[in-house]
Image (cartoon, rainbow, N blue to C red):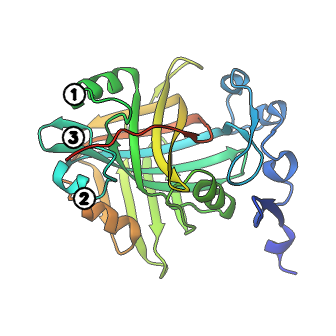
Amino acid sequence: MSSIEMDTVKVDLGGRAVTVPKGGLYDRYRMNTDLEEVARDPRVSSVDFFRQLPKIKVESPIGPTLTPNFYYSVSTARLTMLAPSRAIRTRLPGELAPLEIAPGLGLVSVIFFRYDVCDIDFYTEAAIGIAVRPARHGKLGFVDLVAGLKNEHLDSYVLSLPVSSEIAQVRGHDGYGFPKWVTEIDVDINHTRTNSRVANDAGGVDLSLLATTPKQTAHRSGERVSSLTSYTTINGAWHSTLSQTHVLNAGTIRAPRDVALHLGEGRMADDLRSLRPIRTIQFDVMTEGQVALHMPVPTSVQSRHK
């Protein structure tokens, strides 16, 4: 038996056997993690944010589970780009419309995630997302944009969401309806440099990022909490998923210059090329944060006529 096999265990997730670290948080707690144990982890500065978010048991496509999923130590890097609305619309379902910052111009993003301490154990993730208008009303896009930026609540549709672990793929794909697959993803974010790489099926580069980390600003616990609503379909029905991000250390650069985004060959690169991004307008890096990811709930989505 190899050392990898000795260090992992199979668990049932909605009738599928998935591999998780033996003795890890999921193996021991099945989403009902002991906050006092997490608080003792030197990578976690505090668990106060999670004490205000009691978990509830719900039925889901992956079987009974507890929600939200807690991410106790997170770092992220996000590039926000301008792209033609015409190109964006070719990738959106007919029920969704791009959030425009000017006539004919929408917003797309490339995001890299590193989850060091999490209810489903360590993994990394990357995403290609499109900013969309809230699905349930028809307000002007500019009004939506101003309100969203002011309250740090935006809505999105995700084209690509590869992950590095099997449990994250099964939960994300079967439970949330996200376009997830497993691949090698390296994400290294510190106060000096941000370096990320997503591998393609052949082991080459799908997408990579190398940049200087923006100057970080520390925030008190509870001071800054942003939210994102993502729309997906599960068994043909529209759902919305709420993600709350508790920001502890973060920084932003507008019109960044020292950012090298490389598009190789793969699903993420193809998705980003299809959006025809014009230029990067903002680079956000969070070197320390926390996330509460809620299970998706059914939602009504208004039909849009283009």
Q: Which residue is mark 2?
A: 90
The residue indicated by pointer 1 is: 140
Q: Amino acid at mark 3?
A: Ala
Q: Does residue 286 appear in this view?
A: yes
- Above or below, comparing residue 16 to residue 211 in the picture: below
Q: Earlier in the sequence, mark 2 or mark 3?
A: 2
Query: Mark on residue 255?
Result: 3
Label 1 amino acid? Leu
Residue 159: percent from the left, percent from the top? 40, 57
Please give the name of the residue rendered at 35% of the width and 75% of the height, measured from the top-left corner.
265
Above or below — where is 111 with respect to 48? below
**Discs 2, 3 touching: Cβ within 8 Å:** no
Mark 2 crowd level (few <14, some 14–19, many ≥20, 10 Å Cα):
few
Q: Which mark is first along the chain, 3 or 1?
A: 1
- Is label 3 in a helix, a strand or a loop? loop
Asked whether residue 213 appears in the rendered view, the answer is: no
Q: Position of residue 245 (x, y in %)?
A: 53, 32
